[in-house]
Amino acid sequence: MDLGPARRVGRDFFARPTLEVAADLVGCELRHRTAQGLESVELVEVEAYLGEGEDPASHAHRGRTPRNRNMFETPGRLYVYLSYGLHHCLNVVCESRGRAGAVLLRAARPIEGLERMASRRGRSGHELTNGPGKLAQALGADLEWDGRDLVRGSLGLWSPPQRPSVRRSGRIGISSAQGRRYRFFRADSPWVSRAKPSL
DNA sequence: CCATAGATTGACT
DNA sequence: GTCAATCTATGGA
């Protein structure tokens, strides 16, 4: 029996507990339809960040700020922030509206539009998308993407015909909240980020 | 107001 | 391995 083509993910997919969404995001394809043509990647590594008062490492831990407002917005939208004043990081908003929760997109396997990604990155091969800042730069994402909806429009998410095997670990670069294994990734993918996780 | 830490990356010793 | 790039949020004087 044919498994059929990947299909676009709807609002219900995102309106669930953040950890569940994170696990299911691995293997999904992020597609961007641009004037220049299609650009797409397969997500191979993500991290969950929970809501207000739930997760000390989350931007939403101490409540709303101008920066994190979209973490409390409609699920399926993007939360994009500037890291270290230099790099953009892409997050997918989860939970129900008004309740914070988001999944950081850390690494991906390029599928379509590699030439434009390489041109934005000034690099090639694994260095295209093996880190959150690198992935955002490869896709041409910046703060203009903050609040964009993945459910409608030229930017969307497609679930895979067959779900890959997903492994868990501690999040990368998080010293607090140890013991929380909120990083999800494909163990068999050479496209995961290089940094070492905290167990 | 000033200091500091941070969901990072790239260049360099 | 070290370090600087530079924005956001927080905490203390």
Image (cartoon, coloured by chain):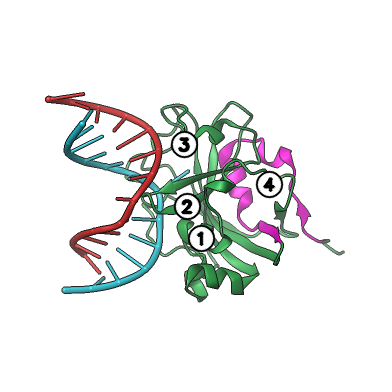
Chain colours: A green, B cyan, C red
N-terminal label among 4 and 1: 1
Q: Any magenta on residue A125? A: no
In terms of image quadrants, where is residue B4?
A: top left
Q: Amino acid at mark 4?
A: Leu
For label 3, the crowd category at 10 Å Cα-Cα, with few meaning under 14, some 14 to 19 and many 20 or more, is some
Q: Which residues are magenta?
A: A5-34
Disc 2 crowd rating (10 Å Cα; few below 14, some 14-19, many 20+) is many
Give the secondary structure at mark 3: loop
Image position of A149 (left or right of A142): right
Q: Are marks 1 and 2 in contact (CB under 8 Å)?
A: yes
Q: Earlier in the sequence, mark 2 or mark 4?
A: 2
Callout 1 amino acid: Gln
Residue ID for mark 1: A137
Separation (CA) of disc 1 from disc 2? 7 Å
Q: Chain of mark 2?
A: A
Q: To which residue does mark 4 refer?
A: A150
Say which label, 1 or 2, has the lower sequence index: 2
Q: Is residue A12 above or below residue A189?
A: above
- Dot 4: chain letter: A
Q: Are marks 1 and 2 on the same chain?
A: yes
* C13 horizontally vs A56: left or right: left
First reached walking from the N terminus: tag 3 or tag 4: 3
Dot 4 lies on which element? loop
Mark 2 highlights which residue? A88
Q: Earlier in the sequence, mark 1 or mark 3?
A: 3
Label drawn at residue A67: 3
Which residue: 72% across, 55% down? A158
Q: Residues within 10 Å of mark 4 (few under 14, many from 20)?
A: many
Residue at mark 4 to residue at mark 1: CA–CA distance: 18 Å
For the residues labelled 1 and 3, say whether their Cβ atoms are less than 8 Å apart: no
Q: Amino acid at mark 3?
A: Arg
Q: Position of residue A73 (x, y in %)?
A: 60, 32
